[in-house]
Image (spheres, rainbow, N blue to C red):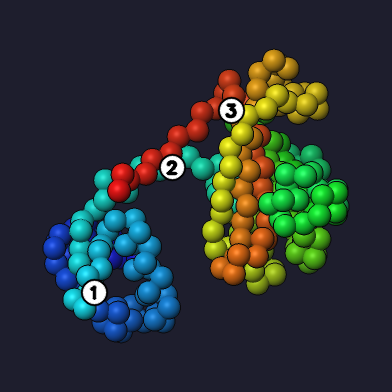
């Protein structure tokens, strides 16, 4: 996909031109048809190309939103290595699920799940508290119990160890006051609210895999996103 995007940016495939067929792309890049189809679908969704029934796929050009990097903390934690941000592990083990997280995992409230919680630091100060919940059987045979930061993202770690594939994530953002423990861990006044970002990760069949919660002191963070108007 990146190779096609570079060719569009370079003018090799100018706006309005017909993109090579799936068969041609398979032959040129030596990949499977599902890989090509998936890449073309993402490019269409992002606005690089458009499909015309019976004619093929045509280049629209580099979308204006391509240069905008959305700030999605839930997704960032799932894909970035833990070693990319300094922090400490504050909890790891089996716990009873809070009601909201249980709903995200389609589990019974107070049922047991595995929790990995890290306190992330930025510029030498506590910045965010990140909690990852997953079914107990999915945590077995992984390094999630280790006190050492993972050298790969959670997504890649679970893919390599458990063979699961993340398909999509649904994020919810709420605001609430911190607990006494959260205020202490984040070094924040008790009268400052938290931004709580919840992410529910599912596979292609819709099965819940992971729930992530990122707690951000509202006086130190702002969330920004960008999207095209259709």
Labels 2 and 3 touching (C-beta < 8 A):
no
Where's the N terminus, which quadrant?
bottom left
Residue depicted at x 75% and y 64%: 138
Mark 1 or mark 3, earlier in chain: 1
Q: Mark 1 and mark 2: span between their CA atoms?
A: 32 Å
How many C-alpha atoms fall within 10 Å of the one at disc 1: few (<14), some, or many (≥20)?
A: few
Q: Assess disc 2: are there few (<14), some (14-19) or many (≥20) residues with their C-alpha within 10 Å of its C-alpha.
A: few
For residue 201, say whether it is visible: yes
Give the label, 1 or 3, closer to the camera: 1
Work out whether 39 lies above or below 181: below
Place residue 166 in its image quadrant.
bottom right
Query: Where's residue 5, x and y in %?
Result: 28, 60
In the rendered image, the vertical position of residue 21 relative to residue 84, given as above or below: below
Residue 53 is labelled as 1
Residue hosting label 3: 123
Q: Is residue 140 left or right of residue 69?
A: right
- Residue drawn 25% across the image and 79% down it: 21
Q: Residue at x 64, y 69 (%)?
A: 164
Residue 177, compared with residue 32, is above or below; it is above
Label 2 near label 1: C-beta < 8 Å? no
The tag earlier along the polypeptide, 2 or 3, is 2
In this rendered view, identify the residue nearer to me: 65 or 88: 65
Packing grade of label 3 (10 A; few <14, some 14-19, many >=20) is few
Q: Position of residue 193 (x, y in %)?
A: 65, 22
Mark 2 residue element: loop
Tell me the residue at 58%/42% (across/down): 172
SS class, disc 1: loop
The label on residue 70 is 2
């Amino acid at each position: 996909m990146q190779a096609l995007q570079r060719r569009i940016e370079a003018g090799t495939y100018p706006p309005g031109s017909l993109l090579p067929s799936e068969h041609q792309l398979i032959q040129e890049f030596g990949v499977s048809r599902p890989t090509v189809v998936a890449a073309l679908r993402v490019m269409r969704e992002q606005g690089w190309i458009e499909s015309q029934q019976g004619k093929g796929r045509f280049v629209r050009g580099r979308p204006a939103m391509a240069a905008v990097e959305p700030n999605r903390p839930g997704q960032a934690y799932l894909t970035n290595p833990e070693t990319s941000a300094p922090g400490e592990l504050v909890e790891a083990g089996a716990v009873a699920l809070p009601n909201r997280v249980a709903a995200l995992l389609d589990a019974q409230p107070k049922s047991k799940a595995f929790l990995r919680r890290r306190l992330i630091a930025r510029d030498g100060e506590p910045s965010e508290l990140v909690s990852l919940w997953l079914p107990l059987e999915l945590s077995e045979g992984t390094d999630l119990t280790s006190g050492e930061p993972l050298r790969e993202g959670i997504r890649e770690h679970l893919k390599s160890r458990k063979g699961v594939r993340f398909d999509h994530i649904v994020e919810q953002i709420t605001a609430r006051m911190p607990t006494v423990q959260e205020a202490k861990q984040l070094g924040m006044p008790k009268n400052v609210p938290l931004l709580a970002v919840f992410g529910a990760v599912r596979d292609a069949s819709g099965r819940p895999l992971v729930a992530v919660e990122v707690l951000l002191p509202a006086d130190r963070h702002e969330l920004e996103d960008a999207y095209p108007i259709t």
